[in-house]
């Protein structure tokens, strides 16, 4: 009789333990957003459209990032950008406020840092818009690009409108396919003509492109170096990098490149050796940079 009571007690305890264990499993293993997974857009692989569902913050380079919205790691941002595809910044879609401008990050030494204390981004336009919230990985991909932000009205700080971001996509010149195609042709021409554009011969092997900075649609800085620096078997202490100012013009379908200025490295900065630079006062924030990948022989938007 006693043994039967013991068996019954053990059986009841086993059931209770199972119910509790299952409840805990449901609570901690299932994300509250796991039923709302959606792809980023047409043409993207489902693996590229995975969501980050954690509401926690992680320390990244001493900055706090909110993990929410679409995960863009490994996704072709340039393709998303030129096709004006919406990217989810948060898991909320209730906002109808829309703002456009160039997305800027606010740094401690930025003149706006005092005016927009506690903000990490803003939209640069005729009328600035402050972007609320912490640092976000999926916003960082669009910094220094012209974008459209959708979200909710966050009120004002002084005369500056605040938007609480929910979605973002590229806009303006970022989706101008004629401009983009022309830039591709310019970059291709730079790749083919860097050795003839340079006023001096490479000291060791051949000139290789490093990156370019578009000042506007017809002028750019070109940075290049001697390919000997890529040779692991060579120990070169000399800085072989050079800099050009190149003007672009069109004759029919041909891209014409003209060297307007040439620099060589100095102790702290480049030294102008020939020509002149009418763009020397242009802010670095207004330059659009593309890096050259030596291995793939292709250009990547920075």
Image (cartoon, grey):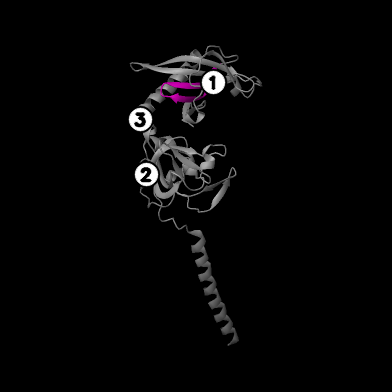
Q: Secondary structure at mark 3?
A: helix
Q: CA distance from mark 1 to mark 3?
A: 27 Å
Secondary structure under tag 1 reads: strand
Q: Is residue 45 visible?
A: no
Instruction: Indicate whether residue 240 is drawn in magenta.
Output: no
| Residue pictured at 49% horizontal, 63% vertical | 26
42 relative to 139 in the view: left or right: left
Q: From the viewer's perspective, is the residue at label 3 or at label 2 nearer? A: 2
Residue 168, visible in the rendered structure: yes
**Crowding at label 2, few (<14), some or many (≥20) Cα neighbours within 10 Å?**
some
Q: Write the start and end of the magenta stretch as one range.
A: 206-226
Mark 3 lies on residue: 177
Mark 3 crowd level (few <14, some 14–19, many ≥20, 10 Å Cα) = few
Q: Which residue is mark 1?
A: 224
Pointer 3 or 2: first along the chain: 2
Q: Secondary structure at mark 2?
A: strand
Residue 229 placement: quadrant: top right
**Residue at label 2?**
98
**Residue under the image location 44 percent in, 47 percent down:** 156
Q: Residues within 10 Å of mark 1 (few under 14, many from 20)?
A: many
Residue 251 vertical position relative to residue 134 in the rendered view, above or below? above
> Sequence order check: which comes first, mark 1 or mark 3?
3
What is the x, y in percent for residue 213?
A: 48, 25
Depicted 51 relative to depicted 271: above or below: below
First in sequence: mark 1 vs mark 2: 2
Residue 225 falls inside the magenta stretch: yes
């Amino acid at each position: 009789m006693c043994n039967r009571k013991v068996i019954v007690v053990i059986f009841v305890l086993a059931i209770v333990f199972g119910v509790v264990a299952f409840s805990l499993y449901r609570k901690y293993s299932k994300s509250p957003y796991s039923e709302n997974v959606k792809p980023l857009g047409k043409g993207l692989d489902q693996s590229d459209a995975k969501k980050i569902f954690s509401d926690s913050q992680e320390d990244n380079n001493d900055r706090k990032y909110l993990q929410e919205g679409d995960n863009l790691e490994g996704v072709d941002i340039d393709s998303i950008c030129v096709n004006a595809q919406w990217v989810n910044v948060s898991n909320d879609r209730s906002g109808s406020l829309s703002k456009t401008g160039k997305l800027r990050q606010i740094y401690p030494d930025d003149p706006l840092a005092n005016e927009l204390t506690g903000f990490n981004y803003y939209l640069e336009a005729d009328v600035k818009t402050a972007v609320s919230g912490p640092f976000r990985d999926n916003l960082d991909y669009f910094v220094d690009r012209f974008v459209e932000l959708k979200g909710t009205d966050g009120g004002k700080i002084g005369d500056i409108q605040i938007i609480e971001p929910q979605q973002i996509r590229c806009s303006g010149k970022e989706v101008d396919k004629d401009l983009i195609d022309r830039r591709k042709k310019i970059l291709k021409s730079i790749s083919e003509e860097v050795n003839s554009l340079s006023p001096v011969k490479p000291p060791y092997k051949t000139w290789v492109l490093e990156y370019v900075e578009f000042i506007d649609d017809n002028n750019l800085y070109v940075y290049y170096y001697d390919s000997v620096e890529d040779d692991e078997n060579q120990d070169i202490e000399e800085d072989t990098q050079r800099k050009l100012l190149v003007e672009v013009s069109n004759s029919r379908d041909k891209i014409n490149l003209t060297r307007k200025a040439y620099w060589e490295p100095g102790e702290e900065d480049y030294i102008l050796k020939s020509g002149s630079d009418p763009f020397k006062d242009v802010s670095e924030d207004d330059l659009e940079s593309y890096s050259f990948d030596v291995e793939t022989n292709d250009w990547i938007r920075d």
